[in-house]
Amino acid sequence: MSRMSSEAFEKLHEMYRSQCDELKQLSDRVIRSQGEEKKKLTRVFDERHREAQELLREMEQELISAPSSFRNSMSSKVRLYHRDLGKLQRQVHTSDTTYSFSSRTGDGGHGIYGAQNEHSTEQQAQRTLLIQGTESLNNATQSIARSQRIAVESEQIGTDIIEELGQQREQLDHTRDRLVHTGENLSRSRKILRTMSRRLMTNKLLLGIIIIMEVAILGAVVYLKFFRH
């Protein structure tokens, strides 16, 4: 839908540029002409001017559904086009003071119609500004809503991280406690091993003494039995 709207706007834009070129040529001819020819060319100019205004209104309608990036840039152009039309119209209707006065008072109210066209052009420019201001306000509102949503999501992420860090701290505390218990168990094991080692050495020493005593007794018995007579 946005793409179709942009394409339609471009077509209207080309039509307006062609119409605007024709209006500029008519404006030059009106300024250089006099008498009945000036009146005739002025009526033609006003008719083309009306058609150009209608094209600008259609362009504004197309901009409502156009993408925001395209709409913002082209809204400024449409506003400038309204000003250009108003400028051309003022040049045409002020090119000859005598003709302007007579057309306002006697020639079928043509000057009044020109003033109405100028007022309509100003209204169109104001409406374009209003549309652009509304769009800017909507964009700002959406941006604030996105910022609030991001802030809430960031707060939730921060809460989750804090909870996860708390769980990791508990796990580290448990691991430290297990390491402390393991160290204590290792100390007790070393003490038990040292005690067993001392007892083993004591047993070996006692066994050696007993063996020596047994050898001595055996030697004494042999001596007494065989050599003492």
Image (cartoon, grey):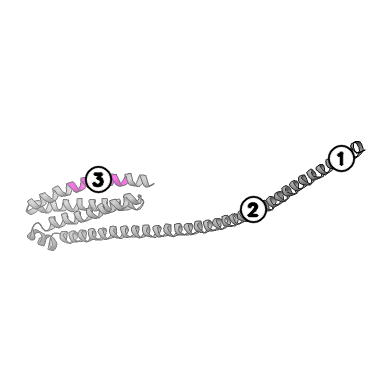
Which disc number belongs to residue 15?
3
Neighbours of disc 2 within 10 Å: few (<14), some (14-19), many (20+): few
Which residue is tagged 1? 218
Residue 27, x across and y down, in percent: 13, 51
Name the residue type under label 1. Leu
Depth check, mark 2 against mark 3: the one in front is 2
Q: Looking at the rendering, which quadrant does residue 204 occupy?
A: top right
Q: CA distance from mark 1 to mark 3?
A: 138 Å
Question: Would residue 182 be found to the left or right of residue 86 on screen?
Answer: right
Task: Give x and y (percent) for residue 228.
Answer: 90, 39
Q: Earlier in the sequence, mark 2 or mark 3?
A: 3
Kindly state the secondary structure of the residue where label 3 is placed. helix
Against 69, residue 141 (above or below) is below
The residue under label 2 is: 183
Tell me if 15 is positioned left or right of 226 in this view. left
Query: Spatial distance from mark 2 to mark 3, Cα to Cα?
Result: 90 Å
Residue 5 visible in image: yes
Residue at 37% of width from left, 47% of height from top?
2
